[in-house]
């Protein structure tokens, strides 16, 4: 193998949630020596979770960060390598060429890429939200609840995340107003019942957040809610709440910006895959986890699709035409393939 071949990875995995690490586990056990670009805050959203009770194999539950450490260590045991930094740019080749991934100024090349960048919390987009982020407005109760001990707070959302965050927050805050835009909840009944059973959680529906206001010192002091059924002229429709902590739990959006315009996505930005496979519309590029899935979004389903992506990548590499020497060694070919992808990405 030439020096040039040694620079070419078989598999680069972008992302380090359950999908990314499971893909790493399977590809490392297939002796493909995967390289995971795992980000500074490796481990994905489960790093921000406390108890995980629904990941199979842990009868008594496991803490989210502990689960991610285990998944990471398990893939490392079989030869996975990690870059604990962000992927900053991707150029996906077409027709089986080499794909290029940058981490800052460092360029990496690979025969196959598994995209597993996950999804991130959705914003409300109301006045004061951005300005007061980290000054009272937060997207992670598990991370920030302790800052609001004995303080009035609110949670926005009607899904399982909102219930889970409310339950966690109620252990710290003096009161938790759970604000949801409808009277019906998307959350599972068991989570709703648990939240309803907690004395300092109060459900407020149907209400939308109109705006967040500060106290004059730059910190959140008030949330103004608006009834969606109101008269429309504003009179009597508004509800003022004194809160110093506001937690937004209204779902997630996929982290697909890195590959925007290069792989097919749906209208919400979730990466599209072919049939039941993890194949994207680019040869040698696979996608898994919450980046693809807006229906199930569970750690175990993400891990399952990470496994599928690894098997799809393995088969792709096995069946890829011509030998490594014949197909990948030429500088000209590499340049031609990546230049084609670059031109397309720029188009
Ligand atoms: P969901 O998409 O399930 O719920 C989002 C909630 O936010 C919905 O109630 C939605 O309202 C509301 N919402 C969305 N946009 C806005 C907006 N702009 N303004 C006001 N409200 C808004 O997301 P979750 O993060 O709660 O859950 C995602 C997945 O993860 C689910 O499958 C869930 O079951 C799972 N999960 C499981 C947990 C567990 O089992 N322990 C814990 C956490 C999550 P509406 O209903 O009106 O659309």
Image (cartoon, rainbow, N blue to C red):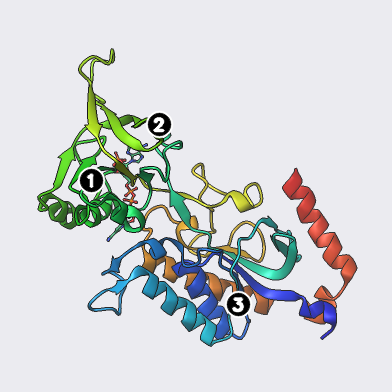
Foreground label between 1 and 3 = 1
Q: Residue furthest front?
A: 217
Q: Secondary structure at mark 2?
A: loop
Foreground label between 3 and 2 = 2
**What residue does disc 2 label?**
126
Point 84% across, 81% down: residue: 3
- The answer to whether one can see residue 161 in this image is yes
For label 3, the crowd category at 10 Å Cα-Cα, with few meaning under 14, some 14 to 19 and many 20 or more, is: many
Residues tagged 1 and 3 counted as in contact (Cβ below 8 A): no
Q: Position of residue 58 (x, y in %)?
A: 28, 78
N-terminal-most mark, 3 or 2: 2
**Front-most of 223 and 124?**
223
Ligand 1 contact, mark 3 (Cβ < 8 Å): no
Point 25% across, 43% down: residue: 153
> Where 175 sits versus 53, above or below?
above
**What residue does disc 1 label?**
151
N-terminal-most mark, 1 or 2: 2
The numbered mark at residue 22 is none
Residues tagged 1 and 2 counted as in contact (Cβ below 8 A): no
**Front-most of 180 and 328?**
180
Q: Secondary structure at mark 3?
A: helix
**Front-most of 77 and 150?**
150
Q: Position of residue 254 (x, y in %)?
A: 49, 51
Q: Position of residue 85 (x, y in %)?
A: 60, 64
**Marks 1 and 3, how far apart in space?**
52 Å
For label 2, the crowd category at 10 Å Cα-Cα, with few meaning under 14, some 14 to 19 and many 20 or more, is: few
**What residue does disc 3 label?**
314
- The answer to whether one can see residue 292 in this image is no
**Marks 3 and 2, how far apart in space?**
45 Å
């Amino acid at each position: 193998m030439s020096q040039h071949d040694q620079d070419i990875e078989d598999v680069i995995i972008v992302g380090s949630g359950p999908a990314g690490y499971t893909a790493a586990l399977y590809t490392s056990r297939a002796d493909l020596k995967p390289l995971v670009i795992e980000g500074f805050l490796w481990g994905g959203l489960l790093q921000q979770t406390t108890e995980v009770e629904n990941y199979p194999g842990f009868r008594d539950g496991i803490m989210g960060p502990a689960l991610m450490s285990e998944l990471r260590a398990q893939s490392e045991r079989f030869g996975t390598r990690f870059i604990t930094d962000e992927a900053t740019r991707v150029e996906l080749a077409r027709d089986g060429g080499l794909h290029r991934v940058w981490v800052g100024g460092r360029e990496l090349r690979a025969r196959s890429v598994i995209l597993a960048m996950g999804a991130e919390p959705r914003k409300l987009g109301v006045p004061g939200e951005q300005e007061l982020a980290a000054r009272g407005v937060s997207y992670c109760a598990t991370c920030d609840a302790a800052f609001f001990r004995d303080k009035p707070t609110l949670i926005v959302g009607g899904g399982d995340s909102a219930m889970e965050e409310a339950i966690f927050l109620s252990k710290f805050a003096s009161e938790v107003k759970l604000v949801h835009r409808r009277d019906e909840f998307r959350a599972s009944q068991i989570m709703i019942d648990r939240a309803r059973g907690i004395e300092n959680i109060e459900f407020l529906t149907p209400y939308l957040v109109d705006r967040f206001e500060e106290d004059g010192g730059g910190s959140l002091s008030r949330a103004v809610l608006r009834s969606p059924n109101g008269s429309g002229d504003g009179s009597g429709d508004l509800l003022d709440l004194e809160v110093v902590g506001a937690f937004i739990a209204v779902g997630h959006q996929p982290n697909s910006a890195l590959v925007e315009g290069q792989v097919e996505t749906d209208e919400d930005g979730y990466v599209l895959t072919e049939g039941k496979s993890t194949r994207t519309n680019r040869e040698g590029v696979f996608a898994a986890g919450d980046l693809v899935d807006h229906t199930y979004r569970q750690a175990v389903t993400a891990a399952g699709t990470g496994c599928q992506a690894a098997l799809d990548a393995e088969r792709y590499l096995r069946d890829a035409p011509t030998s490594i020497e014949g197909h990948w060694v030429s500088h000209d070919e590499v340049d031609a393939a990546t230049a084609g992808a670059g031109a397309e990405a720029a188009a």
